[in-house]
Amino acid sequence: MRLLDIKRMAHNILEKQNIENSFIEYKKSANFKDKILKTACAFANNYMNNEIGLLFIGIEEIYNKESREKAIPKRPIIGIKESEIEVIENELKSLLSNIRPKINYHIITDKIDDEYYIVIAVESGINGPFQTTEKAERDKDINLKPGRYIRVGRDSRLPNPT
């Protein structure tokens, strides 16, 4: 998928306020390193058979009491400061290096509601299965159990043992 197509798709998802699902995940900030890493790994493993997974950074989730839907992107978005974008992008690249084998992804920055957000577009991988490293568990900022995470609905988790 071309970068411009991914950017348009991401923008449309926010415009329509699509809820989280098997290929959409929202994070308020890049500080949720364990959840970002787990989700990127799950998207690459592509258990739900999606072409791509989109992980949004700078998007807060809300719960709609009337429809009882949760994980809806809050508008206007909380966003990311322009001065922090490069630092966050570099942190994300470093974070994603904790997945083996290496995953295919793109980090895209865009703007909506006059605020910046970042999208990590993770392509479904053919070199998998993909797993998070022990290094990520030892890193106190990540502290994620190593494993081959999968996406089931809107949850990223380890598969059930058989």
Image (tube, rainbow, N blue to C red):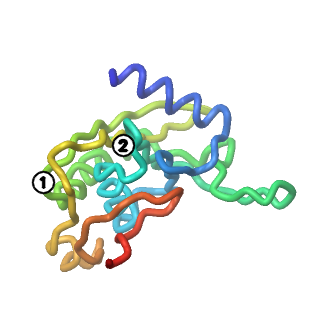
Q: Could you tell which of marks 2 and 1 lies nearer the N-terminus? A: 1
Answer yes or no: do the residues labelled 2 and 1 have beta carbons within 8 Å?
no
**Mark 2 residue crowding within 10 angstroms, few (<14) / some (14–19) / many (20+):** many
Q: Which mark is residue 42?
A: none
At 22% from the left and 65% from the top, the residue drawn is 132
- Would residue 33 be visible to someone looking at this image? yes
Q: Residue at x 52, y 56 (%)?
A: 153
Determine whether the residue tagged by mark 2 lies in a helix, strand or loop. Answer: strand
Where 141 falls versus 14 (above or below)? below
Please tell me whether mark 1 sits on a helix, a strand or a loop. Answer: loop
Give the left or right position of residue 145, taking residue 47 as reference. left
Residue beneath disc 1:
101
Dividing the image into 4 quarters, which one contains the N terminus? top left
Amino acid type, mark 1: Pro
Q: Position of residue 150 (x, y in %)?
A: 36, 61
Q: Is residue 149 above or below residue 93?
A: below
Q: Residues within 10 Å of mark 1 (few under 14, many from 20)?
A: some
Q: Nearer the viewer, residue 61 or 51?
A: 51
* In this rendering, the label closer to the viewer, 2 or 1: 1
Q: Residue 53 at x, y = what percent?
A: 40, 43
Tell whether 44 sits left or right of 81: left
* Residue drawn where x is 14% and y is 72% of the image: 135
Image coordinates for residue 17, horizontal then vertical, percent: 66, 40
Q: CA distance from mark 2 to mark 1?
A: 17 Å
Of the numbered discs in the image, which one, if any, rests on residue 120? 2
Q: Nearer the viewer, residue 91 or 18?
A: 18
Quadrant of the rendering where the C terminus is positioned:
bottom left
Please determine whether, in this image, residue 97 is positioned above or below residue 10: below
Question: As drawn, is 110 to the left or to the right of 46?
Answer: right
